[in-house]
Amino acid sequence: MKRFFKKIWKTPMVMIFIFITAIYGFSALGKSTEINRFAVVTAIGIDNMADENNQFELSFLTFIPIAEQTFTETYKVITAKGDSFVEAIDYAGQYLGREIGLSHLRTVVINEDLLQNDVTKILDYLTREKEVPSSTKLIATDSSAKDFLSAMQKLDMESSIKVSEMVNFNQRYITATDASLEKFFKGYFSPTHASIIPIFSLEKDEENGISVANNEAQGGEGGSQGGENGGQTGEGENISYNIVNGGEALIFKNGFLKRQLSADDLKNINYFRGNFSTGALTIKNFSGKPFENANLTFNIYDKKMKTKVVFENGIPVFYCDIKFTVVLNGVEEDNGMFDENVDLYLITSKAATEIEKKVKSNMADGLAIMREVKVDIADFYTKIYNTDKKSFKRFLDSLDDKDDYLNHVLFKTRVRVYSR
Amino acid sequence: MIRDKAIGAWQTGIILFFLIFANKILILPSLLFNNAKFEGLIAPIFLFLIELGLLFLFYKLKIKFPKERFFDVIKNNFGKVVTIIVFFLIGIYFLGKMVLLYNVTYIFFRNLIYKESNNTLFLICLLPVVNHLAICGVRTIGRTAQLFLPGVVAILIFAVVVGVFGINSSVIMEQSTFSNIALSALRHVSVFGDTIILFLFMDKINIKKGEWKVVFSFFGAGAASVMAIIVVFFLSYTYTSFLHPFAFFEILSYVKEYGGLGRLDIISMILIIFLTYFQLAIYLKAFFVCFDGIFPKLDRIYSVLTFNFIFIILIYVAVINLSRIIIYAEYYLPYLSIIAFIIVPACCFIALIAKWRKEKRE
């Protein structure tokens, strides 16, 4: 033992280690644990406040960890108003008696009313706050963001389905888009200054979407009056809300809202921009072996797009070569159920031509939208610029309105369809 | 008293690799983007070429003066007063660089891991280890670095490979002018120039004939690693690179957030803390060499006390937030880099010419 201590004494690093452990190890034991200090925010809802003193109403979906013998998860929606994000966050912490922890933030829900002005003013704090993950999903809602957060909470409790995961999964679909703080600002700071945010609706009488039961208290008369009759506290009524991820989206340029896209609009644009891996293509009234006047639904199994830019007489010509691998998985015929196995169906040239026509038409519609609002959401700019910088700069200089370049670029698309 | 033994080509190369690599993987890439957009990556290439010139100068000097101390090389050509001034300036230079490196690492850990940490806590955890490593000498630093090298290389390769898989964006170049790139290179020159440490340790370095390629290879590997991290970082975050100040951490954080690979960012933190320990120890050793050169009769304890006293004052006075440290690094420290990039090479160059003329006369 004596030798051991002598050896330690001669080894300064061991002494330093013991010193640091003794001071900071024991002092750490005396501190309150983080789970008792923090309210973990998993979603923030931002609503507009038409108030002189307050600019925002922030709602926080907070997970309050309680350490007992087992951990229990308690979610609560807290609302606070403030003239700035920081002020509202401070108030929320004050109301809750805990520090607001944003490191587990997964979703930011913005009320559409706020998006009529410069959206970057709303998102500035969240981008600069180091705790907030840049992958935090961004969605807009046409209802109150606070109500949306309540519905999110119910949805999570009922089914463990998380809205942030729904947004993340959107990138797989041709009819939807995902958005995160990082992606929004990448678009904002890019040369096109274009960004996109998906819309999630909260509807009462809607057939689409996920149903969430919501207990809405009907306030009874005299509830606060007391007296000998006592207060009628009101009866809870089960109202079912639907969270609808319908594929609608908002496109922004320089942080300002340019247009709301329907799911079909988005689908048309996504032919250019999306890395989707699934989507349906329907051809109506198709007649060709072995079908007769049938509605055929193909599922897109794979999509590959090659692009090439050539300058012809100083004008950029954007060639798009898209290859679809499709699978036929729906046949509707007037004569009833189609009596053959479609798994073995090899796409005929006629069917391929029909699909090509449809895709080309959709792409033309998508392009028309981008041209109309002058927002290059598919980032053609980078591809053209990287092909021939000088020619592109000359081309832009020749335009009266440089933002209107999409209307002057020629697009040529080639669509090829293959069976899986 | 611990004897400061000599190091061979491998240990010299490893120390050089750590010096080249360690202090350029946190805030530098973000600042380069801020100054010169994507063309910002040209600035480190340019600065690495100058640094390669310094290494070549060291090679020549070591060939001509194989056993001599750097202090004696300068003294024999310029006299004692000039030598003391040069060593004083080099000491100040490394002290300045230590303040920068310490602050960047401290702010990184405070912002991203432990908000309640304070300077005292960080100093207590860092200074004793760094002091001990520096007192033990170049050979100890070299051997310990050699021990950690496989881990560092593994983490580095892992970060770059998973970072490459996370890239899914294309960017446009030529957004900056030549003057932006040149200004960016000038502003960040202070992060470079660490090769002059080899000059200070030259009497402790024993490189046999034919082993120089090991040293040059490590230099190349270090420079390539830094460039790989800058490129992966730029292509991961593209236009928002300026919003992410801690590049190496952010690469793994990006993969974690978008690739769903779990808490990879912890790996980057481990690497950063190891590299910080090593680099601070090497800088401190350089400071000790300068102190010993200026005050040859004083014991090591005086240089240790002097360093710790000045360093703690500087840390408490000169810092501590990210914006202040960036102003310090971009606007004040580059002036000190004149020592590494002009004064030391000029002295060496003159010493080499003098030696060459002497040999010619003989």
Image: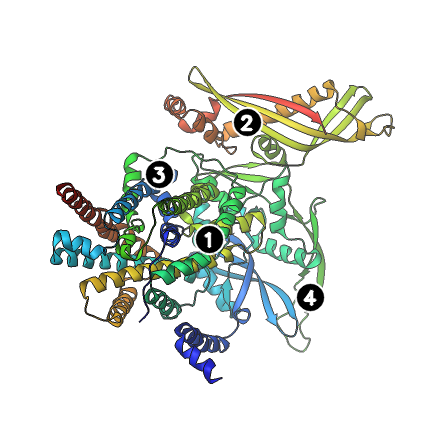
Q: Secondary structure at mark 3?
A: helix
Residue A335 occupies quadrant:
top right
Q: Which mark is residue A367?
A: 2
Find disc 1 in the rendering and name its residue: B249
Find disc 3 in the rendering and name its residue: B42
Residue A82 drawn above or below residue B340 = below
Residue A152 occupies quadrant:
bottom right
Residue A219, given in percent of the width and then of the height, sits at: 65, 64
Q: Mark 4 and mark 3: span between their CA atoms? A: 70 Å
Q: Amino acid at mark 1?
A: Phe
Q: Mark 3 and mark 2: span between their CA atoms? A: 37 Å
Q: Are marks 1 and 4 in contact (CB under 8 Å)?
A: no
Q: Label 4: few (<14), some or many (≥20) within 10 Å?
A: few
The residue furthest front is B362
Residue B293 drawn above or below residue B188 = below
Q: Is B349 situated left or right of B2 in this image?
A: left
For the residue pair A28 and B153, the one nearer the viewer reads as B153
Which image quadrant: the C terminus of chain A?
top right
Find disc 4 in the rendering and name its residue: A234
* Nearer the camera: disc 1 or disc 2: 1
For the residue pair B9 and B171, the one nearer the viewer reads as B9
Q: Mark 2 and mark 4: span between their CA atoms? A: 54 Å
Q: Amino acid at mark 3?
A: Ile
* Nearer the camera: disc 3 or disc 2: 3
Q: Do dots 1 and 4 share one subunit?
A: no
For the residue pair B241 and B339, the one nearer the viewer reads as B339
Q: Are marks 4 and 3 in contact (CB under 8 Å)?
A: no
Q: Do dots 4 and 3 share one subunit?
A: no
For the residue pair A218 and A286, the one nearer the viewer reads as A286
